[in-house]
Each structure stands twice: as C-alpha cells, then as structure tokens.
Amino acid sequence: MSIRSSIATIALCSLMLSGCDTAHGQSRAAMAALRDRFDLDDVHRMARTMYADQLRAGGSHADAYAQYAKLADLFPGNARALAALAEMSVVAGRWADAERYTQAALGIDPAHVPARIVRLVLDYTRAVNAGDGAELSKVAERIPELRAAKPDDMLLRRMAISEGLRRHDLAGVIEELNIAILQSPEDRSLHALRLSVHMQADDIDAVQAEIASLTEHFPDDPGMTQSVVAWYEERGAFDLAEDYLRQRANARRDDQAALGALLRFLVERRGLDAALRELDNRIETEGSTSFLQAALASIQFDYGHHDDGLRALRAAVAAAGPDEDVITLKLALAHMLKATGHDAEMLAEVQDILAREPQETEALKLKAGWLIADDQTGEAIGILHGAIGIAPQDPEVMTLLSEAHSRDGDRDRARQMLSLAARASGLAPAETLRYARYLSTEGDGLAAESVLIAALRRAHGDIALLDELGRVYIEMKDWPRARDVARALDRSDEDRARALSVPIWTAVHAAEGPEGAVLTYLDTLSRAAADSSSVQLAIVKAYLDAGQPGGALRIADRLLQAEPGNTQLLFVSAMARERAGQLAAAASGYRAIIESGQANPEVWTGLARVLTLLPGRLDEAAAVLDRALGAFPGNPALLWIRAGVHESRQEYDSAIRIYELLYALDGYSMTAANNLASLLSNRRAEDPDSLARARVVARRLRGSPEPRDRSTYGWVAYLSGNYETAREVFEDAAASLGSDPLVRYHLALTYEALGQIREAREQYEMLAGIVAPNDTREFVLKARAFLDADKQPGLIE
C-alpha cells in the first residue's frame, strides 16, 4: 500500500513527541547552589544556564523551559538558550514556538548546530505536509553533515529513522533504533517502533523476540497487546496469539485486564465454552479466589447476562478475605453498575474505594466521568489532573480530560488531550480513531491522515483504521491514496473489509471515472462477489447513496429469491423503496420485519421515519417509537427520531428531556448540545434555571466549526446579557449564514441592545428582503413592526 510515510507520522505520533531527553540523576545540593548564585545576581548567565541544563537533564522540562526563556529575555543574543527552547518546543509539538526560536537563534549564529537541527526538522515536516517528495529528499541531504557535527543527537537520530522509513530502508532503521534504545531504554515508543519494523519485514523470529522483551519491560501496555494480537491474527497465527495472551496473563496474575484480554480472545476465536474452561482450569489450580470469581462474573456480564454478572460480583466482593484485593473487585462492580445505569450505587462504591485508597486512578476516572456527564467540568478537570500525576501515561485519563475540555468549549485543549491519549496508548486503534475523527471534524485532514498511518504501522491491516483513512482521503479528494486504501481492504480475507472498500471505490469512480462509471463498477462487483452477502449489502447501500434506488431494488430482490427470510435483505429492500419514494410499500416492508419478531432498532427507526413523511401519520410514528423504545430502551437512534417527533408536535418539554439524555450519552455530540441549548433558550428563556442550564451546555458550542452551533452559543449569550459576545458571534454567523433570516434577526436584536440602531435597521431590512411577503412567523412580524415604526419619526431612537 503506497501510503506516504512522514515525520508527521513518526515524529508527531510516536517519535518526536515521546520526549527526546533522558532523565539523569542530579545533585540537590548543586541545584540549590546554582539557584542561590543567580538569586544574588539574577543576570549571572552561566549559573542560570547550568541550572536550566540540569533541570532538563533531570526531566523537569517545564521548569527548564522557564529558565531558558528567562535567559533568552535577559540575554537577547544567547543563541544557546534560544536553540534549547526550539528543541524543547519541537519535542512538545509546539511547532510555531519552535519556528520562532529557531529563526531567532540562527539570526544570531547561522552556524549553530542545535538550531540547524531544529531547522531541518521543521523543513522536513513542512515538506511532508505539502506532500513534496522532491523537497523531502533535498532536506534529507542535510542530515549527514549535521550528524557528523553531532553524532549522538537524538533529534537527528529520529530524523534518520523517519527518513529510513520513508525510503523503506528497514535494515538501516533497525540499526538506528538499536542505538536509540541504548540511549533511551525507557522510551517505549522506540521499542514499539522496532517491533513495528520487524513486523513490516515479516521477520517472525525478531517479532517474537521483541514481543518477549516488551512483555518483560512494559507489561502494562494495552496498546502494544492489541497490536501484537492483531499481527498474529492477520497471519492466521491464532495459537501464537493465544499463547502470548496466556503468558501475559500468567505473568500478571493479579491483573484483571490481562486475564480479561485472554478471555475475550477465547470467546471471540474459540467460543464461550473455551473461556469458561480457561477459568475452570485456573480455579482448579489456583483455588476459587474472589479474583477468578470476578472474572467469571465479568464474562457473564459482557455477554449479556447482566443480572447474573452483578449477582456473582457482589457475592465475590462480600466473600473477599482480608488478604484479597477487594478494591479491584469493587472497581469491576462499579464499572458494571455504571454500564447498567445504577449511578447512585456506582458512586457509593467509588466513594468507598477512594476512602480506602485516595489515589486509586480507576475510581478517580469513574468519579470524573460522572461529574463530566453532570457538566461539573471544573471539578472533573481538577480530579483528572490529580489522576494524571498518579498515572501520567493513562490514555483514558487524557480522553476524559478531552471530553471535559470539550464540554467547556476549549477545543484546543480537547484536541491536545486526544493527541496525548493516542500517543500514550501507543497509537492503539480506539484512541487513534477517536483523535483522527476529531481532527476530521476540525477540517485537519492531513493531521488525521498522519496519525492513522502511524497507527497502521503498528496495527497492520486494521480494518477500522483503514476504513477511517479511506474516509479521510475521500474528504481530501485524494483519489490515488483512496484507491490504495480500497485495495488494502480488498486484500483482506474478511468479507467485512471488502464490504468497507465498496463506498471508497464508489467515491473514486464517481470522481475520476466517466459518466456511468459508478453503476458499471457496482454491476460488475455484484456478479463477482455473488457469494458474499456483506459485499452485496454494501453494493445495495452504494446504489442508494448514488441515488439509484432501482439498482438497489434489483439486487435486493434477486438476493431475496435465494434467501426470502433474510432480515437484513428485507430491511435494505424496504429502505430502497423508501428512497425511491414508495413510502407505503416501505412502511409495509418495515412492518413485516417487526411482525416477524426480528426487528432491530434500525428497522423501527425506518418505519417511524417513513410515517413522519406520510401525511397525518405523526401520532402513529410516536406510538411506534414508544413501542420500539420499550424493546430497546436508551437506543440513541430511536431517541433522536423520538425527540424530533416531539418537536414536530410542539412537545418541547419532552424533547428537552430526550436531548438531555442524548447529551449525557455522548459528551462529544455537538448536535445534542446544540439542540438542547437551542430548545432551552428558545422555549424556556423566561425560566432562570433553564437559561442557566442552557449557558452550561452552550459552552460546548464555543469555537465549534459549525456556524449554527456558534449561533446558538451567541443567542444564549444574548439572553444572558453578554451582548458584546453575542455581537461577535452573530456577525461571524451572518458571514456564513447570511440567508438565514433568524440569524439576521438575532444580530439585529443584539445591535438594538447595544444601542446601534442604524446597524439594527440594516439587519431588519436584510431580513425583510429574505423572507416571503406572506411569512407570518413571529420574529418576521416583529422585524416588520420595527421597520414600520422606523418610518414614523420619534418612535425609534
């Protein structure tokens, strides 16, 4: 797969940002003496420089950075301090600061080697982001000269590794990594990259040796475990994957997560009975410990037997002896209680855990998660910062911090925390996907591409990562690379992967092929993949997305002849009829599935959606949704359409209750936040409690890339009397939503509140020019009343 390698991939996601400095011991007495020296004479440059160097060598990077910054302020010609600031900025990913300090250092001393090294890193990164292969090669030519001047520089070594990866010089990369690991033996990103390179080279002996080393040195790395298992599975080496997981579980006998990973693998690959046999064997050899009983309870819970799992785990907690790890059992119970909505009991367990062990990170995360869901973000952030101090490499803590900052409207910090979470997880698929999707919503496709490619270096062929990368390339209209991703998915043995390639190929053919290329591709594929139901369903959906419901119906009906009772085929057939405008037939199709007892939430949603489109059937749609939610309580798709039906029936209090639930279910959902804040501010503006709630929720919308989200934030600001904030927001919204009369109306009201009557009049006039003459909406009538009064002198000042 010819996907571009890059320093953004290696440096940003696994090398540069992992920290280039190695901590060394330091003399407290010497540090104190140096501090005393420049306390007496604050401009003693040598003492402050030595102090900054020792701080940096000892791993106190923030304090060292502050000292170098002070040096740069006191001595503007100090190229050494500026270069140190540039190096530390690169390591921290602060590219703008690195650029500024590098320029300043080279302006003082153009030959300064550390500054030239940072200049090389910045130029290389810029060439990568521009996709300029010729410039990359040109920049890379500067590496040998700088390495001759500073052969052991870690930034340069990482650059050489990145360039070796780009040129696919795997032997050279391994050689550089071996030396880098000797320099920084505790840097797990280097070990992980060496494992990844061995995997790319398909050197099974080297891979197994590296896995043994990693398991010994970094046994607590779940991201590494996922990558190793994925690599084995990709090669069909399921026995080796099982052996690896069992060895890890044996080495960490008190770690429920390690045993859980083995049990999940056994359930997925060998069946539930295999996992139960594993537990029985362990109980036979180790005794019926509370820990193993808890593992059995977790399996019961994870596979749908919630009541049995909770009952068994409560019993294990009650039976735990004084020498057993009751806190781990209580944590597992708290997680189960959270999953089943028993918040009060969950919080009671968490408080009990924290009373026993105030620094228990898992309990702190559970408490912080509850606070975030309750929009108590300030307290949650405080708790999570404490948790970071205890577990600085815990990606879940960083993910929770991201959600808290996101709810607070601080999108920059939210993005930074997701980046840190992805890095701390070793670019595990879950954290990487979360970060990449956030980057995509921000419109930063290049950054999303880089982090996904870096993750794929570790989790080769991961279907979810490839699927997301394909989406990124479609959004970027990078059709050659989209083709590469589609081909990679097609090479998989899994039907699911080949099905995921269909929408990517469809987009490529639509963009690059002649007229009719999409239909030709889908027709050819439907015959070639006749034995794959997953691919056939993907083809049907692709026809629908291409606006060709007839083609979708033709294939669905043909497949139904072979499998007349296939629920999924009946569903897509009904959906095709819905897209074709055959609403009554679609409703009948959805109803038939429901009456068969095989309906999932998608089927119920389809029927309700069709009923909302049929005249006079809104009440029936509401009844269908209530019945569906009885069968699938809390299902988000059903809740979304139910809230919409409530709004259509002007049942705003009921809609607000559902949006509150959806907002609690997904703290990252801008749509839930916008809908909730909008209804609270438009339908309950006179209620102080509702307006206060709207203010809390609307914080989430601050800085959103969507103008409508920002407009809701501005309206809440206006109602709260923050007119200057409202003016800034509505002026910005009017630039992109100028044809929306409500945006014009809100901007006019804001101008009125600020006493800018002329500006308000201009907005009302624009509004009047947008709406139809017979428009009788309340805000339109108010705008006309203003303009009519404005024509009478003295009525409007």
Image (cartoon, rainbow, N blue to C red):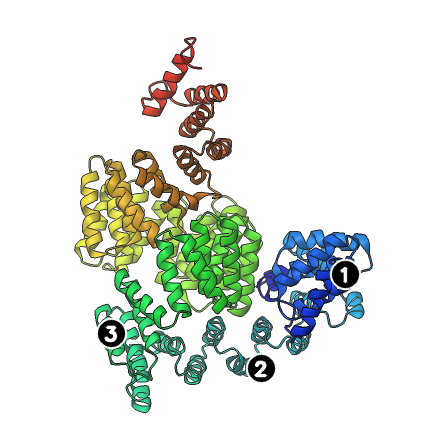
Q: Is residue 12 visible?
A: yes
Residue at 35%, 54% (x, y): give it: 373
Q: Amino acid at mark 3?
A: Arg
Q: Amino acid at mark 2?
A: Ala
- The one of 104 and 204 positioned closer to us in this rendering: 104
Left or right: residue 580 compared with residue 717 = left
- The one of 453 and 680 positioned closer to us in this rendering: 680
Mark 2 packing: few (<14 Cα in 10 Å), some, or many (20+)? Answer: some
Mark 1 packing: few (<14 Cα in 10 Å), some, or many (20+)? Answer: some
State which tag comes first along the sequence, 2 or 1.
1
Q: Amino acid at mark 1?
A: His
Residue that carries the numbered disc 3 in the rendered image: 314
Q: Nearer the viewer, mark 2 or mark 1?
A: 1
State which tag comes first along the sequence, 3 or 1.
1
Residue that carries the numbered disc 2 in the rendered image: 206
State which tag comes first along the sequence, 2 or 3.
2
Residue that carries the numbered disc 1 in the rendered image: 44
Q: Position of residue 590 (x, y in %)?
A: 23, 50
Q: Position of residue 393 (x, y in %)?
A: 51, 68
**Disc 2 versus disc 1: distance between alpha carbons?**
52 Å
Q: Residue furthest top?
A: 793
Q: Is residue 610 visible?
A: no
- The one of 576 and 138 positioned closer to us in this rendering: 138
**Disc 3 versus disc 1: distance between alpha carbons?**
64 Å
Q: Position of residue 33 (x, y in %)?
A: 70, 69
Q: Residue furthest front?
A: 40
In this rendering, the answer to whether 743 lies above or below 124 is above
Element on which disc 1 rests: loop
Say which quarter of the image contains residue 82: bottom right
